[in-house]
Amino acid sequence: MRPLLTEPEQLDEWQPDVAIVGAPWDDNTTNRPGARFGPRAMRANAYDPGTYHLDLEVEMFDHLEVVDYGDAIMSHGMWEASKDAIHARVAEVASRGIIPIILGGDHSITWPAATAVAEHHGFGNVGMIHFDAHADTAEQIDGNLASHGSPMRRLIESGAIPGHNFIQVGLRGYWPGAEDQKWMRDNGLRHHTMQEVWERGGKGGHEGCRGRGA
Ligand SMILES: [Mn+2]
């Protein structure tokens, strides 16, 4: 139900607070591809009315001008071209001071998307609150530096978002292993495991945060 804009000049005309950008890419998954259908599925699910926030008693679009800025154009099987397309489309939004909300897509899209945001605010000035089962800090997976398990590593290595600006919430399961976790500690990342969230609930204070500086 939001206006669809397709050209950067329309962003200048409209001057929205928020612009949605789809990034329908899933070739960097190790398993369970299909996230390329995420943006269109989320748009389809937003078909019904319902923009009033019950808890806050706020009609959200009275306060936020939100537009749909379409999808970044993906070139199937071609990460470099697709990465550049995601970066460019998010940069068109972020460089105008508009907040981008990016719909994926597998998690590799966070590398170009968050880089574009960091370029606007300055490398090192952006924080990442990362809700995920996995830390996505692998050096590489099966030789793929752009794997969906690696975007946070790339952002930290490039300096776009330093490790000490990361809070990861919900880590669980078997991965990453000890070596990558040591790298995360050495780079100042902090996290709340899913076990901790279960035990303490969502209102726990900062003092329980694990990792350096906590
Ligand atoms: Mn992830």
Image: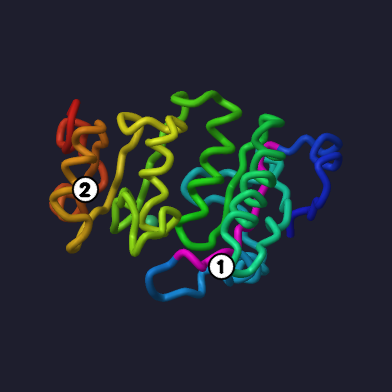
Q: Position of residue 206 (x, y in %)?
A: 22, 32
Numbered circle sitting on residue 180: 2
Along the viewing direction, whichever of 92 and 58 lies nearer the viewer: 92
User: CA separation, marks 2 and 1?
Assistant: 29 Å
Where is the C terminus found, in terms of image quarters? top left
**Which residue is label 1 attached to?**
38
Q: Is residue 119 above or below residue 170?
A: above
Q: Which residue is drawn at 58% across and 72% down?
A: 37
SS assignment at label 1: helix
Q: Residue at x 53, y 32 (%)?
A: 118
Indicate which label's residue lies in the foreground, 2 or 1: 2
Q: Position of residue 189 (x, y in %)?
A: 26, 36
Q: Where is residue 39 in the image (x, y as percent from the top left)?
A: 61, 64
Q: How is the image coloured?
A: rainbow
The first of marks 2 and 1 along the sequence is 1
**Residue 164 within the segment the image draws in magenta:** no
Write down which quadrant ligand 1 falls in: bottom left
Q: Is residue 74 left or right of residue 188?
A: right
Q: Where is residue 36 in the image (x, y as percent from the top left)?
A: 57, 69
**Range of residues picked out in magenta:** 17-28
Residue 8: image quadrant is: top right
Q: Is residue 167 left or right of residue 13?
A: left
Along the viewing direction, whichever of 159 and 171 lies nearer the viewer: 159
Q: Is residue 66 above or below residue 161?
A: below
SS assignment at label 2: helix
Q: Is residue 163 left or right of residue 93?
A: left
Residue 207: image quadrant is: top left
